[in-house]
Structure formats: structure tokens, C-alpha cells
């Protein structure tokens, strides 16, 4: 298949912000794609070569790409750099330079999807002493044979700047239409996706075995299952009612969620963003090997930092010490963790996700030999409100964030934030009951003491229904000096020239970002606002919802993707429950 066919569609998608138009373009592309190539096509349009969990990533340095462009087109490096400064996008630079060499391109064979994928794979894998030269050579070779448009997308792909903003859900829609003729069938395809987190593999199954193949799609150890998440309500009373009067109350630990895949002696750990984080926790892997007594298993738990001397639970921030490339063994000794298991999804060939909570919990008890490093979460099964409240106080005292109440007969809803798990968190003095997670979409230059950094960030929440981000607040308080100093550097990789197509803003920021970085903020209350676009018109005509007196809590939520931010729906619920309390 010609790479140019894929590039044509990328151009179309780049030119639109409408999800339906994107879907149409994708359907057209999928229909043209041979079954054996559909996985590669899907990864490439998302700017990847593999699903994220595989951990083989592109993203070569701009400096390196500049060298490759200069080599491919026989242009001096400084000239490439000058063009880059002028145009702000290396892809466009490559496109312009390639356009001047049309003759050469006509002489060479057209690029195929296979060749592009294979070469990008080689670039990503090149390692060792002479890997830089190897990467430059490979990339230059590809660019030399590319048309101008192809060059643009190749450069954007290798530098990790593809950013077409195609959401997974849009691809699922397009797959359903292209292969089954009906969008209705997306639910089956989505289930398969939730089971494997691998859009390419799902698409290939669909293309080769049809809807039947998708309906039979099975869990496999080594492929992360998309995680089940919790809803929130403000009181224990409401939660118990919602869960039918009785529930399993579990402590909500303040750590990092881990999905553990065990196959014999091999253990793989996936983060909440489904990235492979096995290397960060060699101690957890060893504990699992020793204490989980079955051959194959997929289990979930919260990994919590504990005090090396007292065993007390420590806050989430302490896990930062583990986010390093070198010296992990040492860090593991100095900053120990305990694992609190709360679910099991698979044991020795048996998919348990459709079993009831109580059945899964019992199985989990059966396979884990507990000690101080690995045990099950504290759990109380009750229908008595005062018992729930006491249990909650205990959890808080022990350093937890609150409770998660779970439906006794609930299945494991992969990839969903449903009402089978409902969290109850500690309330703050202010009327805004709890912090929210927002995505940084823009920034405003600072003045005075803050000149050179940003004075405030423009924050947005996730509008799931429309798959966009809507602004909710301008956050300028709560930053420590070192936070402020780091802001420009931390955010620069996401900087773009215009407001991102998936961001809805009425406010003009000085700098715009691709929605990527998630931070936690708290405010005094939620108010109606004519300038913010969150839930616009949903409560009152001409107004959205905003956070009043917002401040950063100090927590960057590096473990969350932008789509994991607080949703508009949740904000509307919070706004309404706040009104109830005032009444
Ligand atoms: P928050 O922002 O409140 O930390 P979240 O958005 O990360 O929550 P939620 O769906 O709100 O995710 O809450 C579920 C998270 O709580 C899980 O992802 C997990 O990391 C954590 N957790 C702690 N204890 C438990 C438990 N006993 N059962 C399930 N999840 C738990």
C-alpha cells in the first residue's frame, strides 16, 4: 500500500475539527487498506508504530531530525535551522525542502506503508554507540524518497509531533462503519479494545475474522486491560443508596494503580495510563513472583510508599523517587512500597471480569500469600451507614484518601467509569468538596516576580460527549517558586501556535498547548461564568461553569492522560450537589 494514501487522509484530518468528517476520512482509508496492513496504518495515523504499552517509542530529538533533513536534501544544517525558526514546524520545513527536489522523487519508487513502518521501527530500536548516526541515515534515506507531503508527516511522526487529534473513540467508530457497515457495532469493537488496549490488533482481528472474531476476542496476559474507574458522590448515604443499600467498602489508598500481569516467573506491571512500568518496581515484581500462587494471573492493586521504619503509609508524592532510569534498586531500598491488591481479572486461562465482585475478591484471597509487602485492601461489607462513616475515619487516619464503595455483584467494567465503584473522599472546609483534575491548554505571560515564566495557566476539563476540552479556570495561585521556574520548560514540548482543535475557549491565551499535562486544583466553589466554556448553557443560558479562587494543590498528575481529567458531567454533578448543600 502506498504511504501517500495514508498521508492524503492525514491532510484531510488536519484540515478539519469536526469529528464526523474525521470519521468519514478514516472509513475511506480503512476500506482501501489490505487486512494485513490495517494495524500498521492505525498506529501510523496516531503517530506511533506500536500500541503505547509495548514501550517502543519514536520521538527523536529535533537536532537529530535537522541533521537528517540536511543530509536528505543536501542543504546546510544552519539553513534548515533558519527555516525551522521561521516556520515553527520541522515537518513543514521538510515539505518545503522536498518540494525543491521533485525530480529526484520522481525517479525513485513510491514509498509504501510497509517500508515507512519498517524504517521507523529500525529508527526507534537503534541503540548503542553509533545509534545516532544510524538513525540519521535511516531517516535521511526515507526522506530522500518521500514526496513533500510524505516528508512532512514522516518528520512529524519521528519527532513525536503528529498530533492530528484523532481520539481512540473516533477510530472505533470508523472501524465499525468500514468493516460492518453499522456504527452500532462499535460496542463490540470497543469491548475488544478495552480487553487489549491495542487498536491495531483489534482492527486486524476485525479485518481478518469479522465481527465474530471480535465477539470472541480474549484477554491475553501481557496486554493491559483498560482500567475500571470510579464515579464520585458527596455522601456515604447517597452512595449506599445508589449501590442498593449494601456495599463492599474499601480504603482508597493514595498511591499508584498497577495492573500486574504474571506468566510463570515473568511479571509485567502497567500503570494507570497503561504504560509498562515494570522497571520502576523490581521489588514489587519479586514479591508478586513469590506470593501470587498461580501460574498466570492479571491482578490489580495500589502501590503505596511506606515509611521504611514504621511501615506507615506515605503520600503519593513519595513514589516520585521511583521515576528514574538509574539506581532503581537503591531507591527501592530507601523508599519501600507496599502493594494493596483489590481485584483479579484473570487466573490460569479463566476470564474473571464478568464474575461478581465478591467472587473475584474470594479468588484473590485464595491466590495471594499475604505479608507486609503484599496484601489485600482493607474491606468492610456493610449496609450500616454509621459503620461506613467510622470506616471512612479510620481510612483517613491511616493516610488514605477515603473509601471506594463497590457493588457486591458488580462485574469488572473495563475502560469505564461506571456506578459500580463510587468513591467517597475527604471533604475540605471550602464549599467545593474536593479537588478536580484539569488539563493545561494555555498560559499567560507573567509580570514582575514572574516575568520570564507564566503568570497563570488556562485550565480545562474533558467534555467526553463531544471529545473536546472546555475551559474552567485561569489558575495563578498555589505555585511554589520552583514550580514557576520549571513551568516554561515543562510545558514547551506541548506548545503550539493556535488554540488546539480539541480545545473550546472564549479566552485568548498568550501561549497555547496541546492538551497533555494534567494538574490538580481546588477552589472555593463552582460558579457560573460568561467566559468559560465548561457546561456552557447547561445550567443557564449564556453561562458556563468556572472555579472560583482556584489554586494548584501541588500535584501534577503525571499518571493521568488528558482524557482522564475531571469531566464536564462530573462538574455539572458537583455544581448541583453544591447547590443542594447551600439550600
Ligand atoms: P483520584 O483523582 O481521586 O485519585 P482517579 O481519577 O485517579 O482518582 P478514580 O476512578 O477516581 O481515579 O479512583 C480510582 C483510583 O483509586 C484507582 O485508579 C486507584 O488508583 C485508586 N484506588 C485506591 N484504593 C483503591 C481501591 N481499594 N479500589 C480501587 N481503586 C483504588
Image (spheres, helix red, strand yellow):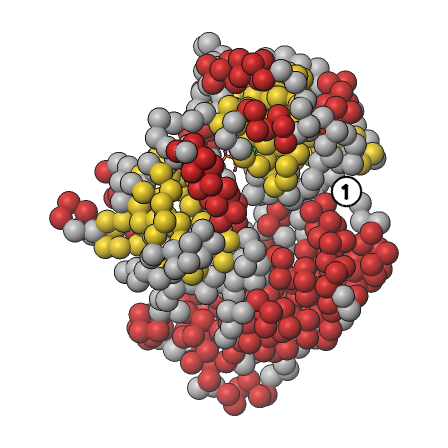
Residue 1 at x, y = what percent?
70, 75
Q: Quadrant of residue 50?
A: bottom right
The outermost residue toward the front is 583
Q: Residue 235, percent across and down?
A: 52, 27
Total labels: the figure holds 1
Split into quadrants, the picture shows ligand 1 in the one at top right
In the image, 136 versus 494, the foreground residue is 494
Q: Is residue 130 left or right of residue 377?
A: left
Image position of 517 with respect to 339: above or below: below
Quarter containing the C terminus: top left
Q: Residue at x 47, y 54 (%)?
A: 538
Q: Residue furthest left?
A: 448
Looking at this view, is 217 or 51 the one in front?
217
Q: Position of residue 348 (x, y in %)?
A: 82, 31
- The residue beneath circle 1 is 219
Quarter holding residue 185: bottom right
In the rendered view, tell whether residue 397 sits above or below residue 128: above
Question: In the rendered view, does 65 fall on the left or right side of 285?
Answer: left
Residue displayed at 67% across by 24% down: 245
Whether residue 20 sits left or right of residue 349 in the image: it is left
Which residue is painted at 46% across and 14% down in the image? Answer: 397
Image spot of residue 127 (x, y percent): 54, 51
Relative to 335, say whether 423 is above or below: below
Let me know if residue 211 appears in the view. Answer: yes
Could you tell me if residue 440 is visible in this image? no
Amino acid at each position: 500500500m502506498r504511504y501517500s494514501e495514508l498521508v492524503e487522509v492525514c491532510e484531510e484530518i488536519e484540515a478539519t475539527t469536526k469529528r464526523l468528517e474525521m470519521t468519514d476520512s478514516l472509513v475511506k482509508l480503512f476500506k482501501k487498506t489490505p487486512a494485513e496492513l490495517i494495524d500498521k496504518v492505525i498506529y501510523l495515523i496516531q503517530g506511533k508504530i506500536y500500541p503505547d504499552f509495548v514501550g517502543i517509542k519514536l520521538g527523536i530529538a529535533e537536532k537529530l531530525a535537522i541533521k537528517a533533513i540536511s543530509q536528505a536534501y543536501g542543504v546546510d544544517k544552519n539553513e534548515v535551522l533558519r527555516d525551522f525558526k521561521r516556520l515553527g514546524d520541522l515537518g513543514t520545513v521538510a515539505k518545503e525542502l522536498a518540494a525543491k527536489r521533485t525530480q529526484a522523487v520522481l525517479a525513485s519508487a513510491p514509498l509504501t506503508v510497509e517500508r515507512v513502518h519498517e524504517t521507523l521501527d529500525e529508527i526507534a530500536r537503534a541503540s548503542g554507540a553509533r545509534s545516532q548516526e544510524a538513525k540519521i541515515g535511516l531517516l535521511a534515506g526515507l526522506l530522500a524518497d518521500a514526496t513533500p507531503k510524505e516528508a512532512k508527516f514522516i518528520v512529524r511522526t519521528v519527532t513525536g509531533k503528529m498530533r492530528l487529534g484523532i481520539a481512540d473513540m473516533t477510530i472505533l467508530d470508523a472501524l465499525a462503519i468500514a468493516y460492518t457497515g453499522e456504527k452500532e457495532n462499535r460496542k463490540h469493537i470497543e469491548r475488544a479494545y478495552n480487553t487489549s488496549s491495542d487498536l491495531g490488533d483489534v482492527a486486524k482481528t476485525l479485518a481478518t475474522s469479522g465481527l465474530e472474531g471480535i465477539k470472541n476476542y480474549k484477554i491475553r496476559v501481557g496486554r493491559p486491560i483498560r482500567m475500571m474507574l470510579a464515579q464520585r458522590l458527596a455522601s456515604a448515604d447517597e452512595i449506599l443508596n445508589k449501590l442498593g443499600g449494601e456495599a463492599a467498602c474499601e480504603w482508597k489508598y493514595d498511591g499508584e494503580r498497577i495492573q500486574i500481569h504474571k506468566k510463570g516467573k515473568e511479571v509485567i506491571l502497567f500503570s494507570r495510563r497503561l504504560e509498562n512500568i515494570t522497571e520502576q518496581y523490581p521489588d514489587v515484581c519479586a514479591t508478586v513472583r513469590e506470593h501470587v500462587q498461580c501460574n498466570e494471573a492479571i491482578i490489580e492493586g495500589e502501590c503505596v510508599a511506606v515509611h521504611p521504619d514504621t511501615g506507615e503509609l506515605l503520600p503519593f508524592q513519595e513514589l516520585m523517587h521511583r521515576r528514574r532510569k538509574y539506581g532503581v534498586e537503591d531507591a527501592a531500598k530507601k523508599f519501600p512500597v507496599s502493594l494493596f491488591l483489590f481485584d483479579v481479572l484473570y487466573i490460569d486461562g479463566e476470564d474473571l471480569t464478568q464474575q461478581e465482585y465478591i467472587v473475584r475478591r474470594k479468588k484473590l484471597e485464595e491466590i495471594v500469600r499475604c505479608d507486609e509487602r503484599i496484601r489485600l485492601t482493607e474491606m468492610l461489607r456493610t449496609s450500616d451507614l454509621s459503620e461506613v462513616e467510622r470506616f471512612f475515619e479510620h481510612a483517613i487516619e491511616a493516610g488514605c484518601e477515603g473509601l471506594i464503595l463497590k457493588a457486591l455483584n458488580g462485574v469488572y467494567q473495563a475502560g469505564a467509569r461506571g456506578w459500580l465503584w463510587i468513591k467517597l473522599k475527604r471533604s475540605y472546609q471550602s464549599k467545593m468538596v474536593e479537588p478536580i483534575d484539569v488539563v493545561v491548554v494555555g498560559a499567560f505571560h507573567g509580570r514582575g516576580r514572574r516575568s520570564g515564566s507564566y503568570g497563570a495557566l488556562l485550565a480545562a476539563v474533558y467534555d467526553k460527549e463531544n471529545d473536546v476540552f472546555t475551559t474552567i479556570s485561569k489558575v495563578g495561585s498555589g505555585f511554589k517558586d520552583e514550580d514557576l521556574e520549571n513551568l516554561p520548560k515543562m510545558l514547551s514540548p506541548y506548545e503550539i501556535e493556535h488554540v488546539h482543535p480539541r480545545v473550546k475557549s472564549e479566552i485568548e491565551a498568550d501561549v497555547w498547548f496541546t492538551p497533555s499535562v494534567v494538574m490538580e486544583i481546588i477552589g472555593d466553589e463552582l460558579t457560573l461564568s460568561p467566559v468559560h466554556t465548561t457546561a456552557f448553557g447547561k445550567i443557564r443560558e449564556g453561562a458556563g461553569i468556572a472555579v472560583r479562587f482556584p489554586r494548584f494543590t501541588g500535584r501534577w498528575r503525571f499518571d493521568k492522560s488528558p482524557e482522564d481529567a475531571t469531566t464536564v458531567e462530573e462538574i455539572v454533578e458537583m455544581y448541583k450537589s453544591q447547590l443542594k448543600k447551600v439550600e
